[in-house]
Amino acid sequence: MDVLRRTIWNHRDEFLQGIVVTGQVCLIAFLVAMAIGLVVCLIRMYCRPLRWLAILYIEFCRSTPIYVQLMWVNYVWPELFGWPTAFFDAGWAALALQSSGYLAETFRAGIEGVSRGQREAALSTGLSPTLTMRWIILPQALLTMTPSLMNQFLVVVKSSSLVSVIAVPDLMYQALRLTSIWFEPIEILSFTAFLYILIVFALSAGMKWYSDRLRTRYA
Amino acid sequence: MLADFIQAVQASLFWEYRTILLIGLATNFYVFGLAALLAVALGLVACLARLSPFRSLRWGGTFYAELFRNTPEYVLLVWVHFVPPLLLTLLLHTRINFSPFFSAVAALGLASSGYFTETFRAGIQSIPRGQVEAARSTGLSGTLMFRWVIMPQAVRRILPEAMNQFISLFKSTTLVSLIAVPDLMYQVSMITQQQMRPMPLYSGAAIIYFVVILALSSLVRHMSEGWRAVGRT
């Protein structure tokens, strides 16, 4: 008990800060990934001349391990593009890069899942293609995509533990730092693993509940 | 910027270290192979537990699968590398250390066994009940039914998903460099520290993994279509 108080309870602020940073990284990464994913998906589906580029992008993001992307973004991008200069930015950028490829494919599956008749009917009532996309196709596609979007968010949360490698002070980083201060890995690392399991499990249970509710309400 | 980009993918530095890097990639495959064996074995056991008629075993199997599916791989890797050796040391009063290689195989195997449990279970449960009833009514015993009726159909449904799991397991093997298993990423970071030129090496590593994994996943996609087609006829 004494060890637990010394290594965990007395450092509750650090653990909390770690969780907050993990949350920030995940949220920014996921929102950016959704935006990029949607754009890439639309390019792939509706912009013939750039289609090969979109496919290359998607395949690159999906076929490269997240750790490799993280190192690549962290070490190569600053020299190549002059950005990201902060570890925090590199962390979410890498996570967003990875997810945007998966999300682009999720969006495509969702949009293609909306029946053709919907699109034709909307166009024939005089809606422009943009308005059709915004008001007819996307709302229906989003409903079918919700479970996979949520799954992808869980993947982001789980991969986010890796950003500690490039010194982003997330939950895992705090845990490793405290381990090296106290050298009590049993308590600290087990507690951290427990926290991650709790977070991921709670998120997945909550999301499942929410997507079931959405489906009973709208579908 | 174009010049930068050309430098980023410059091959000469890569060529200089080709042996070390290839050995690194081979280490990736080695870790992958052992972890995959462990994952499939544990996944099968946990899957049988989940399908067993005893409630406590079912609970155990479910708990096992959920536990390892919800833990981030990196966290599990660090945990396995540091915590069990210490616990064993305390229990047995002799100093025990896990080699990085052992920890890597154990952690990745455990992490992916959770997913395999679910894949196997979904495959077996997707066989319609009518098949079981028909097999029973022709007088097949439980074992024979499993061997000749359920397995042949289940395996075809499981294989495509299992192959995807293998590919994500292979992607996870890049993490083992973090506990100093000398895989490709580890070699790249070591050489980078000597040369102080991260650009070509990390870009090259990304491209190597991209090519290897893209080739593997296209192969899997191609084979999966065959398995699905056989399943339909």
Image: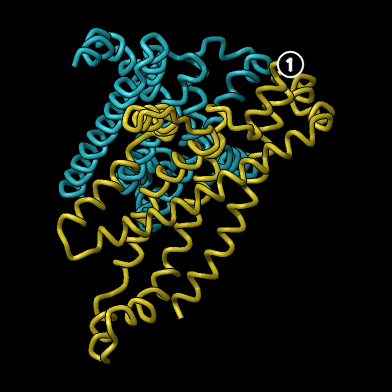
Question: Chain drawn cyan, letter?
Answer: A
Vertical position of residue B170 compared to residue B57: above or below: above
Q: Is residue A27 visible?
A: yes
| Tint applied to chain B in the drawing | yellow
Q: Give the labeled residue for mark 1.
A: B194
**Residue at image location 44% in from the left, 56% down from the top:** B40
Kind of element beneath mark 1: helix
Residue B182's x, y, as percent? 63, 32
Vertical position of residue A83 compared to residue B30: above or below: above
Residue toward you, B233 or B87? B87
Bin the neighbour count of mark 1 within 10 Å (Cα to Cα): few under 14, some 14-19, many 20 and up: few
**Residue at image location 15% in from the left, 46% down from the top:** A217
- Three-letter amino acid code at disc 1? Gln
Residue toward you, B211 or B105? B105
Residue toward you, A45 or B210? B210
**Residue at image location 21% in from the left, 39% down from the top:** A205
* Residue B80 appears left or right of B216: left
Residue B96's x, y, as percent? 44, 30
**Residue at image location 50% in from the left, 37% down from the top:** B104
User: Label 1 is found on which chain of the structure?
Assistant: B
